[in-house]
Amino acid sequence: MPLARPILAWLALTVGIVGGIYGIGGGSILGPILVGTGLPVARVAPAALASTFLTSIAGATTYAVLALSNPGMIAPNWLLGLACGLGGLIGGYLGARLQPRMPDRALTLILGSLAICLAMLYLVQAIR
């Protein structure tokens, strides 16, 4: 069941805020939610990538500007960011080429498995 536009807009705003706070791409949160509502992975993946791109630009720019006037280590680590970005660029290209060849059910199972593993990792870290 697709989400209504106002709910999707609020969800996107919330995901953007969480993504900005924690430094994670909005697509990594929004993607599983959208797939869970029944949207096909083939439709969600490009939208999640665009969301992650825009959220990343906004977050990195904001942190860079804040670093000019605030004490502490809040400036982006550009070398690490570029290294991760290069890996993401290559992986995104390969994933986009591979995705049309995979059944939607397999993609959904992979995404669900990754989401569960990530949730368990976060829970273990929070308990420690």
Image (cartoon, rainbow, N blue to C red):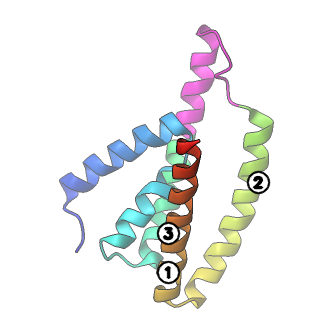
- Does residue 68 show up magenta in the picture? yes
Q: Secondary structure at mark 2?
A: helix
Left or right, 71 with respect to 5, comes to: right
**Quadrant into which the N terminus falls:** bottom left
- 122 over 23 or under it: above or below: below
Q: Which of the labelled discs sits on residue 109, or is there none?
A: 1
Q: Is residue 125 above or below residue 21?
A: below
Q: Which quarter of the rendering shows the C terminus?
A: top right
Q: Magenta span covers which residues?
A: 57-76
Q: Earlier in the sequence, mark 3 or mark 1?
A: 3
Q: List x then y, in percent, for residue 105.
A: 46, 87
Which quadrant of the structure image shows residue 34? bottom left
The residue depicted at 61 percent of the width and 74 percent of the height is: 96
Residue type at numbered disc 2: Leu
Amino acid on which the number 3 mark rests in the picture: Ala
Q: Which mark is residue 90?
A: none
Helix, strand or loop at disc 3? Answer: helix
Residue at image mark 3: 45
Front-most of residues 115 and 63: 115
Specify which label sits upstream in the sequence, 2 or 1: 2
Q: Amino acid at mark 1?
A: Leu
Residue under label 2: 86
Q: Is residue 63 left or right of residue 42?
A: right
Q: Position of residue 123 (x, y in %)?
A: 51, 51
Q: Residues within 10 Å of mark 1 (few under 14, many from 20)?
A: few
**Mark 3 crowd level (few <14, some 14–19, many ≥20, 10 Å Cα):** many
Residue 67 lies in magenta, yes or no?
yes
